[in-house]
Amino acid sequence: MEFPSLETLAPYLEQISFGAIAGFASGYAFKKVGKLLALALGLLFIAIQLLSYYGFVTVNWLEVQERVNPLLTTESLNGFWQNLLSVLTYNITFAAAFIPGFIIGLRQG
C-alpha cells in the first residue's frame, strides 16, 4: 500500500488546520462573550432588586419566570445550538474540523 505524497495531502491539511484554528477561536470568543453577557445580566438583576427593595419599582417575578421558562427548555436550547452551528459552518469546506475546534475553544475559554 502506497501512501499519498505530502503535496497531494497539503490542500486537505491546510483546510483541516484552518478549520480547527477558526473553530477554536470562534468557540473561545463565544465563551468570553457569554461570560460578559452573564456578568451584565447579573448586574442588571442586582440593580433591579435594589430598585425594588427601595420601592422605586415593583417586579412581577412570576411573569418574568413564565416568559423565560419556554426559552430554557431542552428543545429550545438544542434548536439554538443547531442554528448556531448551521450559521457558523455555512458554506465552508472545513466544517468537519471547525466543530471540534469550536467545542475545544468553548471548553478552554
Image (cartoon, rainbow, N blue to C red):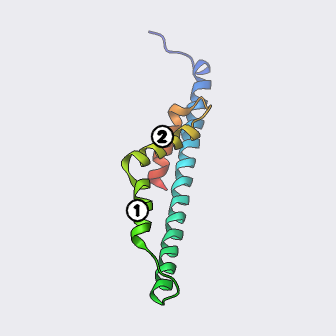
* Residue located at (49% from left, 49% from top): 105
> Considering only order in the chain, which callout, 1 or 2, is on the residue closer to the N terminus?
1
Nearer to us in this view, 105 or 2 = 105
Q: Is residue 49 above or below residue 78?
A: below
Q: Position of residue 30 (x, y in %)?
A: 54, 53
Residue at numbered disc 1: 66
Q: Which mark is residue 82?
A: 2
SS label for mark 2: helix
Q: In the rendered structure, which amino acid carries the disc numbered 1?
A: Glu
Task: Specify the quadrant that holds the N terminus.
Answer: top left
Which of labels 2 and 1 is toward the front? Answer: 1
Q: Position of residue 94 (x, y in %)?
A: 57, 31
Nearer to us in this view, 66 or 41 = 66
In the image, farthest residue toward the bottom: 54
Place residue 62 in its image quadrant.
bottom left
Q: Is residue 42 left or right of residue 19?
A: left
Residues at marks 2 and 1, CA–CA distance in whole angstroms? 24 Å
Q: In the rendered structure, which amino acid carries the disc numbered 2?
A: Gln
Q: Is residue 107 above or below residue 43?
A: above
Q: Position of residue 42 (x, y in %)?
A: 48, 72
* Residue located at (58% from left, 40% from top): 87
Give neighbour class at mark 2: few <14, some 14-19, many 20+ (Cα, 10 Å). Answer: few
Place residue 63 in its image quadrant.
bottom left
Q: Position of residue 74 (x, y in %)?
A: 37, 48
Q: Is residue 71 above or below residue 15?
A: below
Q: Which mark is residue 3?
A: none
Nearer to us in this view, 66 or 98 = 66
